[in-house]
Image (cartoon, grey):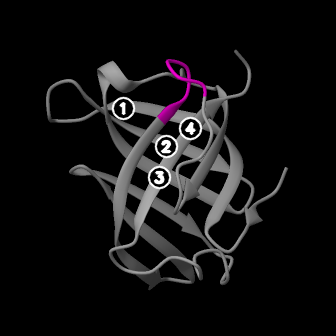
Amino acid sequence: MGIDVGMNYITYEGVVKSIDKSLIPHIYIVTIEGPDVRTVFDIHKMLKVFDLNDNVKITISKSMPSFKEGVDLVIKGFVIAKKYEEDTNKLLISLWGFLLVVESKLKHIFDSFNHMDEVYFKLEVLNK
């Protein structure tokens, strides 16, 4: 599956490529890579519902996505910046203080998101 871009959401699949310990205790820095998109975010160890090499589906939406309670990870946050650096578009989202960065070379991917939009980040593990 590629990237599905709608008026108020983006959805894409990827693979958890790294889960590194942060300098902050109990915090991990996670990297997920998919076709045309890379996602890096901080997460507390108690919220980690995935493992290294898991196939995952990510949704970033302006409305609450449907989810399986106790299985999927859903966090509300705010868009804090949209950047264009070195031929790469970046969407930066604050998830209650934790940073989520979505990167893509596709120009249109973040068009429906603006600064300070309230958004939901959903991570669903596909291979469990």
What kind of element bears circle 4? Answer: strand
Tag in front: 4 or 3: 3
Label 1 neighbourhood size at 10 Å, few (<14), some (14-19), many (20+)?
few
Amino acid type of the residue that numbered disc 3 sits on in the rendered structure: Tyr
Q: At 69% from the left edge and 77% from the top edge, which residue is drawn? A: 106
- Relative to residue 28, is residue 80 depicted above or below? below
**Marks 1 and 3, how far apart at CA:** 23 Å
Of the residues under marks 3 and 2, which one precedes in the sequence?
2
**Marks 4 and 3, how far apart at CA:** 10 Å
Percent position of residue 119, x then y: 44, 60
Q: How many marks?
A: 4
What kind of element bears circle 3? Answer: strand
Dominant SS in magenta: loop
Of the residues under marks 1 and 3, which one precedes in the sequence?
1
Where does label 1 land, which residue?
A: 20
Horizontal side, residue 127 vs residue 120: left or right: right
Tag in front: 3 or 2: 3
Where does label 4 land, which residue?
A: 123
Of the residues under marks 4 and 2, which one precedes in the sequence?
2
**Marks 1 and 4, how far apart at CA:** 18 Å
Where does label 3 land, which residue?
A: 120
Instruction: Specify start and end residues of the magenta stretch as a single range.
Output: 68-73
Of the residues under marks 1 and 2, which one precedes in the sequence?
1
Of the residues under marks 1 and 4, which one precedes in the sequence?
1
Percent position of residue 64, x then y: 53, 49
- Circles 4 and 2: CB distance less than 8 Å? no
Where does label 2 land, which residue?
A: 31
Amino acid type of the residue that numbered disc 2 sits on in the rendered structure: Thr
